[in-house]
Image (cartoon, rainbow, N blue to C red):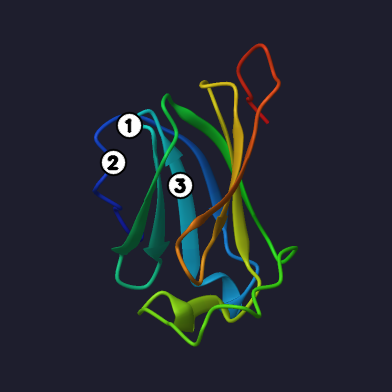
Amino acid sequence: QLQIFNGHTNGVYGIKFSPFNGCRYLCSGSGDNTIRLWNVETPKSLHIFNGHKRTVWCIDISPLQSNNNNDNKMNNIGVIGGNGYTICSGSWDNTIRTWDIETTKQLNIFKGHEHWIMS
């Protein structure tokens, strides 16, 4: 055992290592309806993403979104991935959501599924 990541208040159903910075960051989705971004080396929670109404079942990290219009506002999360990395999450609330890692803001909510998103 290398690390224990404490913080979620319910089961963890999805995890994904970052494709940037040598997989130094880990993202987790939980039954507490949150997504957490972790520093693997510390193991410190860097940010909690809130918005899902039910269990976050699956997550992924992708360099699909370009973030060139951020009004030069940065927080301490901004240094980890550079521009453009997003988290995509699927939930038992029947939505898929995308989140900007750099700004920590929710970008989109995709609705239309009649049942849970599990992968």
Q: Which quadrant is home to the C terminus?
A: top right
Q: Which mark is residue 8?
A: 2
Marks 2 and 3, how far apart at CA? 9 Å
Instruction: For mark 1, give the secondary structure.
Output: loop
* Relative image position of residue 72 (x, y in whole percent): 49, 87
* Relative image position of residue 35 (x, y in whole percent): 42, 46
> Relative to residue 82, is residue 10 drawn left or right?
left
| Residue depth check, mark 2 versus mark 1: number of the one nearer the observer | 1
Residues under numbered marks 2 and 3 in contact, where contact means CB atoms less than 8 Å apart: yes
Question: For the view shown, which residue lies furthest in the right direction?
Answer: 64
Q: Which mark is residue 28?
A: 3
* Relative image position of residue 105 (x, y in whole percent): 47, 59
Taking the spot 58% from the left edge, 64% from the top edge, the residue there is 18
Displayed quadrant of residue 81? bottom right
Q: Mark 2 or mark 3: which comes first in sequence?
A: 2
For residue 93, above or below residue 61: above
Taking the spot 63% from the left edge, 25% from the top edge, the residue there is 118
